[in-house]
Structure formats: structure tokens, C-alpha cells
Amino acid sequence: MTPEVNLLYQQACSAEYKEDYTTAVQKLTEALKLAGNDVMLYTKLAGVYSEMGEYDKALAAYAKVAELKPSDGYIYISVGSIYENQGKYKEALDAYNKVAQMCPEYLYNYLNIANVQYQLRNYKDAIENYNKFLATYSQHAEARENLANSYMNDGNYTSAANEYENLYVKNPAGFKDYANFGLALYRLKNYEKASTFLEKAVEADPDNITARISLALSYQELEKDDLALAQYDVIFRQQPGLNSLRLDYGNLLADMGKDEAAIANYRIYIQNYPQDARAYQNIGVIYKRMNKLDDVIANYEKALALQKDKRNIDLVEDLAECYHMKKDYPNALKYYNEVLLVKKDDYNLKYNKALVLHAMDDYNDAIAIYTDLLKQKSDDSAVKNNLTAAYVALGEDYLNDKNFSLAASAFEQATTLGTKDSYAYYGLAKAYRACDLDDKAAAAYEKAIALSPDNSEYSSEYAEFISATNKPVVVPASEQTEETGEIKEITLTVEPETPSNADTTLANKSLIAKGDENYKSQKYDESIKNYQEALKLNPSDEITLLKIGNIYKIKNDNKNALDFYKKAIVVNPNYADGWFNLGLVYANEENTSKAKECFHRVVTLDPSYGYAYYALALAYDQDGNEKEALDNYRIFLTRNKDEAVAKIVKERIKALEK
């Protein structure tokens, strides 16, 4: 460089220092006229153009430098920086890659490459290069923050949370990325810690809707419903059109027992996202709680229609049960069959299917299932009673069709199972008689009369049978009762009388009375046997099913208690006591969600059921939902006559109101 050129170069440097870029360019241009191939002059000119924002001219100058000195890889650092400033990230990446090829010792270039890859959303490669950079420059806070953000965007929430944690611990006062740290923790289901940092994010920036949403959802997962509700209120004030959040908001309202508001928000969500099956399903769940079966079915059907490729099998099962409760047996059967393709060995599902087939008079298929179930649980009295009833009904069908051999076989199966249904023996007698098996017919007639001595139809027909066959009359003149040992006289008559099941009813009441007596004496096993014998005479007695459930509850056998309480409400879906006791067992198992569902059902069926409000209040109290707890405690006091409990409740209300 000649003295004249050097002077111009120095003047250009001085002008650049004073930010007089026009003069700097002028001096460098004059210098290049004298020394047109000077690399230093072109490098300086490129730098000045870059500072002026004249990026195309700067790039042209760097291109000249590369032409004059092709071995200089460092110029591509500046080229890459210019492309970054222009938002041309692919070109910037190409430039930084040239630096990496030509100057591998320049480790800082890993940061340049990673930053550009981050802008290109190539997070996996960005993560790799940030880690390479940090292997040397481990204290570089910006690189670590960018690495954490890359992990977040790549869905690696564990690594992201670890990086944010390290940044926070090293510099808590300077840490600002509360929102992303909280979101990473939320994604990891660490809701308690997530809410702590999301609270800081919202405090620092009240308009950060993303942080508020994550905070509301975290509170929701923690069942801090009132805090979640407060966040939703702010969110919808700031952005009332944020309808994508209406589903979660509806879920919160449903959990809080605000059913109508929940349904309203689900419907807003559906207007905007009509193909999301979850909203219809959740509406159905609320209607089920309200015992509006038609509405439940309509919404469940819509949800399943939207789940063509991957149907929620639990929802299908729930729908089958709804149709079953509605006594729409063909649809119940259709959905039970679908569920059983997946849950092939589910005992209760098979039993429900058998009940539906039984109700549809498809006795043979029902019998096949009952029989299979008894092989698994030989002591299941409900299944055994229904199997017996199915055989009796099947025998009656065969009798009506004059298929006497099959009728006899069906009635024989019923009697083998130990039925006390006199009609089973009466039908068997008719079938035997038609098959000319007179001795067997006579024995069956006698058994039928012994079980129902007041049934004149049996007596008359037996007398006619004796007369027709010219057999000596063998009258079952007496029958020793099991309860008293007394002799009860039985007289045949040919006068028609109104059929009666008085003896069955009397036996049923006697067995229940024995059960009650054993229960009072705390002879629980004997009491259960008495009640189960009574159920053989009347399988649809929800009160007796409830009593058995109560004994199992006393014995801390929650599994069997649940089983019998569920049977009680299947027999009578509107049985408030059954729902209440079922809720108590769920509460005992700390399944407050199921418990609340049962107690809500009770107050829907019977708004005057005071202790259901008390149980609801306790459940909400346990969940930390003070508002709902207080509401239900107060309702309980309006329906309560138990002063001791009322005193406890009043003290709890005072504690919650503080």
C-alpha cells in the first residue's frame, strides 16, 4: 500500500469512527482507483457498506475479497451476518458452513450456525450446534437460553426444563423466561411448579395470554378450580373470541357443577370446531348426570360418528348402557357387541349383553352367556337367577310352539339349578305329559303344587290329569314348612280361582326378615345368605341388593359393595339410596370425581335428600373447592334435622368463610 493509498485508508477509518460513512466510502473508492486489487481496502469498504445497511454493495465488496483472497474463510462470517440481517437464513447458513469448512478452529461459528438453524426451525440441528458451542463456552447465557427454546420447540420438554432450571438457579434476578419454563413444566405434568413460574410470567406481563392459558390449565389439573376460573375470566375479557379454549373452560365448569354454563361453552366450541368429538362426549356426560338419556344418546352418537377411524371404546360402552337403561335393547345389543370385540373377557359386559338378549326373548343366546359366566363365578346369585328365569321363559316358548321335548329339557335345566319358581315344575309337568311321561309329569305337578299350594290352576289340571290317566290320586296332602316345621294341609280343587304367588311373596319376606335379624345381630355372613336366597325369589329387589352392598361396605369389602350397589341402580336407575351408597364407597376409595357424580345424581332424583348435599360438600371441601363446598353445606342445613351434624357443618362454614 503506497503512502497516498495508506493516507486515504486512514482518512476512511477516521470517518467511519465518526460514523461519517459517506466520506469513508468516498475515501476508500479513491484509494481503490490507485490500488484496485487491495484486499484490505475491499474488506473495509464491505464493512462500511454493512454499517450503512447497504447490504448488496457490502456483499459485492466481500465477493471481490473472496476473488482476490479465496483462502480467507473469515470473510464468510461477515457475509453470513449480512444475510442474517436481511432475513436470508439459508444463504447465511451456507456462508457459516463455509467458515466451518475453511476455518474449523473457529469454534464460535457453532453459535452462528445454531442461531440460523433456529430461525429456519431446524431445531434438532440447532440443538446439536448449540451444544457444540457450549462445550467450549459453557457460561454463554444467550446460547443456553436459545438451546432451551430449541428444546421447547422440538418437543423435548425435559431438556428444556433442565436448561431453564439451570439459567434460573444461576441468575434468578436476571431470569425472564418464566412463561416458557412454566410451559415446559406444564407439558411435563409438573403442575404445581409450573403454576409457580407461570404466576411470575403473568405478574411480569399481564397481557401474556399464552402464559395465562397455561396457568389456568395448571390450576385446573391441580383442581384449584376457583383460581382457574379467575384466570379464564381474565383471558376471555382480553380475548373474548378465543373459542379454542372453550372446551377446557367447559370442562372446568362441569367439574364445578355448573352444568348449564358448561354446556353453553361446549356449544360455542362446537360452533367453531364442529368436528371435535370430545365436546359432544362431554355434553353427553353432563346430560347423563342430569338423567336426560335422550340427550346423552344424541351427543354420544354424534361423538362416535366423528370417531370413524378410532372410536373411543369406553364411550361405546357408556352408550350401550344408556340404551340399556332406556330399554332400547336392539341398540344396546349393537353397542355391547362392538365393545366386546375389544374387551372380550369383560365379565360385566357379557352379563349386560345377556340381560339385553334375555329382555329381547333371545333366551338361547342369553343362556349361553349366563352359563359361561357361572363357570367363572359359580357363586354369582344374580347370574344364576337370571339363567334359571331364562330357562323357564324358553321352556314356556317351546310349550307354546308345541315343541314339548325341548320344553322339557329347558324346564329340567331350570329345576336342576334349584329354582323355587313353581311354574318351572308346572311347565315341566305339561311337557312330560305331552311326551307321555306320565310318572314324571305327576311328580312335577306335585312339586308345582307344593311350591304354590294356593294356585288352583295347578290343582285343577293335576286332578284332570289323574282322571284322564286313570291313575290313583296321589295328593301331596301335606308339606312340612322349612321355617316352622308345622304341617300345612293342601287340598285339591277343581273350582277355578285367581292365580296367586302368595307363598313366594311370603317366603321372600320371611327370608328378608331373617336377614334383617342376622344383620342386627352382626351375623353378616348369615345375613348375606338370607338376602341372596330372597333374591332368588325376586331378583329385581333393589332394596335387598342395597342391603347386601351395605354389609360388604361394613366388612370393608369395597369391591363387592360396589358390585351390589351397581346392581341396585341397574335394577332401578332412579333409586336414590343406591346412588348415594355407591357414592359413599367411591368417596371411601378417594375417587372424589366418581363420588360427586353419584351425589349429583341423588339430588337430581331427590332434591330433598339432605345427606347427599352434605356428602357433596365434603367431597368439594376435600378437593379444595371452597365455594361449592360452602354452597352444599348451606343447602344441607336447609334440609337437615340432625342437630349434631348441623353443629359440625356450621363450624365448618365459619372456618371456610374466614
Image (cartoon, rainbow, N blue to C red):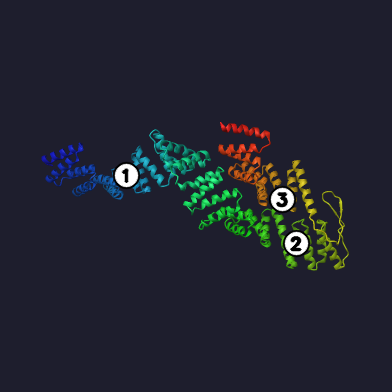
Residue at 60% across, 51% down: 292
Question: Along the horizontal axis of the image, is 49 left or right of 651?
Answer: left
| Amino acid type indicated by mark 3 | Asp
Circle 1: is it few (<14), some (14-19), or many (20+) Cα within 10 Å?
A: many
Identify the disc placed on residue 541.
3
Whether residue 224 is visible: no
| Amino acid type indicated by mark 1 | Tyr
Distance (Cα) linking label 3 and label 1: 78 Å
From the image, tell me which residue sits under label 1: 110
Circle 3: element type: loop
Circle 1: element type: helix
Task: Identify the image quadrant of the C terminus.
Answer: top right
Identify the disc placed on residue 411.
2
Q: Quadrant of residue 598?
A: top right
Q: Nearer the viewer, mark 2 or mark 3?
A: 3
Please state the horizontal and vertical placement of residue 327, each as a whole percent of the image.
Answer: 64, 56
Whether residue 231 is visible: yes
Task: Identify the image quadrant of the N terminus.
Answer: top left
In this view, the residue in front, 400 or 49, is 400
Distance (Cα) linking label 2 and label 3: 24 Å
In this view, the residue in front, 153 or 359, is 359
Q: Are marks 2 and 3 in contact (CB under 8 Å)?
A: no
Distance (Cα) linking label 1 and label 2: 87 Å
Please state the horizontal and vertical placement of residue 624, each as a whole percent of the image.
Answer: 55, 37
**Against 489, is 256 above or below?**
above
In this view, the residue in front, 234 or 585, is 234
Q: Which of the two labelled residues, at mark 2 and mark 3, occupies the earlier sequence position?
A: 2
- Considering every residue shown, the one lying at the far right of the view is 472
Q: Nearer the viewer, mark 3 or mark 1?
A: 3
Please state the horizontal and vertical placement of residue 263, each as a whole percent of the image.
Answer: 54, 48
Residue at 55% across, 42% down: 256
| Amino acid type indicated by mark 2 | Phe
